[in-house]
Image (cartoon, coloured by chain):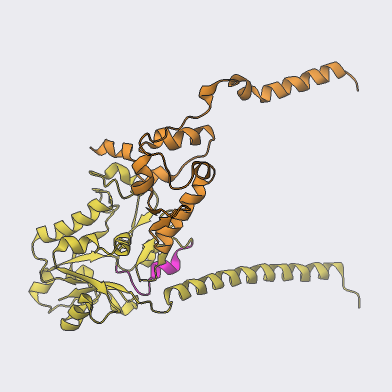
Chain colours: A yellow, B orange
Amino acid sequence: MAIRRREFLKILGIGVVTGVVSSFGGVLIGRGKDILKEIKSSPSKVRWAMAIDTKQFITEEDFKKVIEACHKAHNVPQIPDPVREVKWIWVDTFERAFPTLEHEFISEEVKKRKFLLLCNHCDNPPCVRVCPVRATFKREDGVVVQDLHRCIGCKFCIAACPFGSRNYNFYPPKEFLKEVNPDYPARTIGVVEKCILCYQRLDEGKLPYCVEASEGKMYFGNLNDPNSSVRKVIAESIVIVRKPELQTKPMVFYIL
Amino acid sequence: MYNTGKVIFFIILLILFFTIPMWINFGRLEAIPQPELPKEEKKCVESKEYMRAYHMKLLDEWRKKAVREGVHIYVASDGEKYTISLQRTCMKCHTDKEKFCIRCHNTTLAHLDCWECHISPEEVKKWQ
């Protein structure tokens, strides 16, 4: 039986559409699998982690020293608008930092305690998964870094991060700098920025700025090394992380 | 061909019109960009010829190494080691981006994005 022209065109059309759609889907799924492989790559020797002794952070001065050390070194703009501010490390209450652990009868002292918050450098980072240009990526040593040369400012990572660690540059950041560190770049309007755990300093064998400025109130080290200061301090005390139920596996630990 | 004289005349006129920029700048040496080279340092990371032709390739490689791969030392072809950093290595000698980078880039209409984030030494003075 001869095929009619109309039927031939119909079959051809359906074939073309399914072919295009499935190849697109295949590309997207393949890309997602690549990123997952990257995130769950075989454990390396080094896995940087941080522990913050919240009992030792008492006065406002304790927090200010740490925050200023970071923000000055990384040219973080001081934007007065609280909705559109940019911060790499900041302070909040127990209720807002650990919303699922908070309950009615928690001790007054803990309720009033302030907590130093920063990017958790999660072991399973949602921000890395959603980035469409792979600007955000997880290094082998676990640090979640952002390649700002690639960032297109789509804000997907801001939506994905459950800890509010990411900020979008709504204003030209250079105009909001009071002082400038000539050895470190600033950012441009329209990119997202966050804490990078001072990866350049880690590669040089130095500690992050915040740990250095805290004078022993923060512990930093290799989580895979059983003799590191972080491992010891985590093993010895009661330690919590932010929103553990989300399974992002934060690498910033809070000693209560 | 009809009107040969007129046609050839207008073809020549058209060519002359489109090459106006060339004729205006003909023989003018100041039209060639003169980037200011550092006075104290005589040696760059790689040879002068290589830097002139491939500086963008080198910078791109540096960016990949420093940000993506976590490699912060560059071994030059003559074996010398340099810290991979635009602000801490390049700009220590080439202290003025306006006089070094921008002069050529403006002439060739190649727009630079580097300085939207990176801070050059002469820009630092604004904050002092």
- Apparent side of residue A78 relative to residue A28 in the rendered image (left or right): left
Quadrant in the rendering for residue A178:
top left
- Apparent side of residue A202 relative to residue A18 in the rendered image (left or right): left
Residue B3 position in % (x across, y down): 87, 18
- Which residue is depicted at the point 26% across and 47% down? A181
Q: Residue furthest front?
A: B78
Is A182 rendered above or below residue A225? above
Towards the viewer: A41 or A83? A41
Residue A106 in sight: yes
- Which residue is depicted at the point 43% across and 77% down? A41
- Apparent side of residue A207 relative to residue A46 in the rendered image (left or right): left
- Which residue is depicted at the point 53% across and 22% down? B29
Residue A137 position in % (x across, y down): 42, 65
Residue A152 in sight: no
Quarter in which the C terminus of chain A is drawn: bottom left
How many numbered dots are placed on residues in this image? 0
Residue A213 position in % (x across, y down): 17, 60
- Apparent side of residue B100 relative to residue A103 in the rendered image (left or right): right
Q: Majority secondary structure of the magenta segment?
A: loop
Quadrant in the rendering for residue B18:
top right
Quarter in which the N terminus of chain A is drawn: bottom right
Q: Is residue A126 magenta?
A: yes
Residue B119 position in % (x across, y down): 34, 43
Q: Is residue A122 magenta?
A: yes
Q: State the extent of the magenta-drawn residues as a range.
A: A120-132
Towards the viewer: A213 or B11? A213
